[in-house]
Image (tube, rainbow, N blue to C red):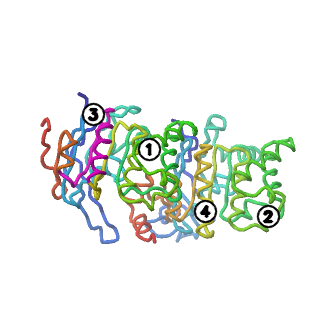
Amino acid sequence: MEPILQISNLSKQYGAGCPSCIELTGPEHQRNVCPSCGTVIACADIHLELYPGEVLGIIGESGSGKSTLVKTLYFDEEPTSGKFHLQVFQDGKDNLFELSRQQKRWVRNHLMGMVYQNPHLGLRLSHSSGGNIAEKLLMAEWRHVGEIRERAKDLLGQTQIPLERMDDQPKYFSGGMQQRVQISKALANNPPLLLLDEVTTGLDVSVQARVLDLIRQIQRELGISMIVVSHDFAVIRMLTQRTMVMKNGRIVEKGLTDQIMEDPQHPYTQTLINSMI
Amino acid sequence: MDNLLEIRNLYKTFTLHEFDQKQIAGCSDINMTLRSGEFIGITGKSGAGKSTILKCIYRTYIPTQGEIWYNSLSYGLVDLAKATERQVLDIRHQEIGYVSQFLKLLPRVTAFEAVIEVLVMNGKSQDEAVDEAAEMLRHFELRESLWHAYPNTFSGGEKLRLNLARAMVKRPRFLLLDEPTASLDHVSKAFVRDKIMELKGMGTSMIGIFHDLDFMESVVDKEFNMVGGLLVGGVGAEC
């Protein structure tokens, strides 16, 4: 089977950079700031592939570079270097990081969905829930108002938002509901790739459970390929088959999720596992 | 007869980084051949390294040294110790079952849904899966009142029935059994034996870990004993 997504040599730095940035940062130095020039190496030397229908987890503490990584994939951040190929775009021939702005927007609107930790990044909180979904559909070139409304109803139903709330603004919703509206919006264009960045962080446990169950259900029913970023092994265990562990901007370990949890190899992964409550 | 699995010089050592690189030996120099259709039993005290072997085969553990040659349907002869993650996942989904009384299921998934999930993952439609799951749970005599309950409240025997049902709907070519009879009463044991024999009749090859020697001797073709991470015996073996 061909991977649907392939990333090679991805790096993102904040600052001018110098020739020693890479060798002086990373987990073996316990830092991601270059001591000689002060550049922040948010992530470097990232290689990954994602297969159709697969859910890949990325785990690490805050500042490990995991969110930066998914943000570059959604073109929220421009990487310093790297290649990004999607099988569903031009048969995977083009490096998506080199596309024009307009093409990137097309890829994002048609082929990807993103759910952020913070709902205000993914939603317009003072537009109606239905309007938020319509916005995503319009960007994916849906033109028929009736069809848009139907699709919005379907999606809100799927994510268990009462239909009578369709015309309400998400700013009046609870955190869990906002997250579910965000998921409906991300799914609106039926994307083959869904990116989830700490989507349950900060929610009450029972609300967290509903959101996680929803994601699992979506994955099972639609077979979407997903990248799930989290600092929580319970989330990773529940959603993913494979996991990458990040620290100081680098991938320190990757493997099957059950292997990472039962037989962690890297000292940092062992510490993470031993820190679970 | 063809070999389904051949383990050569398998070692597993755990390195504990938080304890100054302390080394814990799991198993050492394991050699074992499983022919297709065969059932191998492994006995030994707890801590002897029995589960380590099963987990290395399933790749929940990464072998430290050695080879685990598995004759897979989709990839031909594969060394499970070095196969790609993708290959291992495919082989797990399509060919290998792992049953343990202690297997953790995901939270908030009912017994019924847990069986349906396996069926859907293996390409059944939702409707087919519902029928087949009901049939299988009935076959494993799991009380119907438990079907729509969460397994974390089940007794050991009930969990085991569910896990066996989940493993069996896949009709796996190869089944790993981690103490399938621990803490079961006689009636339940007899029941599990029948089910294991049924699977064997369907052509499933198995490796099982047992504490209960009488039980084991009634089902396996070949038995090994583990002492301090080393495999001894191989009664009934060709060697």
Which amino acid, by three-letter code, is at mark 2? Leu
Q: Do the residues labelled 2 and 4 touch (CB within 8 Å)?
A: no
Provide the residue designation for mark 2: A125
Q: Do the residues labelled 3 and 4 touch (CB within 8 Å)?
A: no
Majority secondary structure of the magenta segment?
helix
Q: Nearer the viewer, mark 3 or mark 4?
A: 3
Are there few (<14), some (14-19), or many (20+) residues within 10 Å of tag 4? many
Specify whether disc 3 shares its chain with disc 2: no
| The disc label shown at residue A198, or none | 4
Front position in the image: B104 or A39: B104
Tell me if A184 is positioned left or right of A224 in this view: right
Provide the residue designation for mark 1: B138
Residue at (82, 45) in percent of width and height: A148
Are there few (<14), some (14-19), or many (20+) residues within 10 Å of tag 3? many
Specify whether disc 2 shares its chain with disc 1: no
Q: Kindly state the secondary structure of the residue where label 2 is placed.
A: loop
